[in-house]
Image (tube, helix red, strand yellow):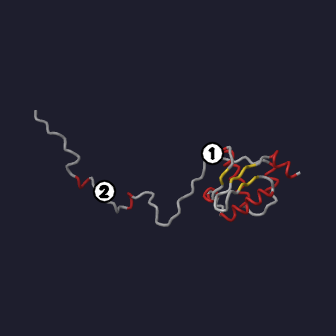
Amino acid sequence: MNKKPPPDIFDNLDALRIDPTDPTLIRNQKKVGEPRPRKVPRGQFVIVPWIWMDQLKTKPGGGTFKLALLLLFEHWRTGSPIRLTNALAAQMNISPDAKERGLGDLEQMGLVRVERRSSKSAPWVKVLFAAQSAAKTR
């Protein structure tokens, strides 16, 4: 009983070749110059103290509000003063100029304390909570 061995799948290599120009095989190819999609954090949120809401509602524009939310989130995430780089602010689409204006506004409202070590380095921001903020506003 001579059984023939099954044919080897590698006998016909041309049948296994893939055409690299076949558009049905190209997935998620990024076009040159196309921005990467933003990663949206899932399941994360920010708790805003009411004193912050009272102070922020008087400020027109959204840059200061977005910066406040970013600072609150980073403070609760890390539990320490925040080194506010331009890259960190850019995660919320806040420009460097808007970051500086917003920091000034938040500092003037008594919601944060800003330490600027030099003109070239990113400022360190300490978030002040309701008890600390309320004492300054009274």
In this picture, residue 85 sits left or right of residue 28: right
Task: Name the outermost residue toward the bottom.
Answer: 33
Q: Quadrant of the N terminus?
A: top left
Q: Position of residue 30 (x, y in %)?
A: 46, 61
Which label belongs to residue 43?
1
In this picture, residue 9 sits left or right of residue 62: left
Element carrying mark 2: loop
Toward the viewer: 4 or 76?
Answer: 76
Whole-number angstrom distance, CA of label 1 to CA of label 2 = 41 Å
- Report the residue at 69% width, 52% height from top: 71
Q: Residue flagged by tag 1: what amino acid is it?
A: Gly
Toward the viewer: 123 or 76?
Answer: 123
Task: Name the outermost residue toward the left.
Answer: 1
Mark 1 vs mark 2: in front:
1
Disc with the residue nearer the chain's start (1 vs 2)? 2
Q: Position of residue 54 (x, y in %)?
A: 82, 53
Which label belongs to residue 30?
none
User: Vertically, is 36 above or below 134?
Assistant: below
The residue wearing badge 2 is 18
Task: Name the outermost residue toward the right.
Answer: 138
- Report the residue at 34% width, 63% height from top: 21
Toward the viewer: 85 or 48?
Answer: 85
Q: Residue flagged by tag 2: what amino acid is it?
A: Ile
Q: Position of residue 95 (x, y in %)?
A: 65, 63
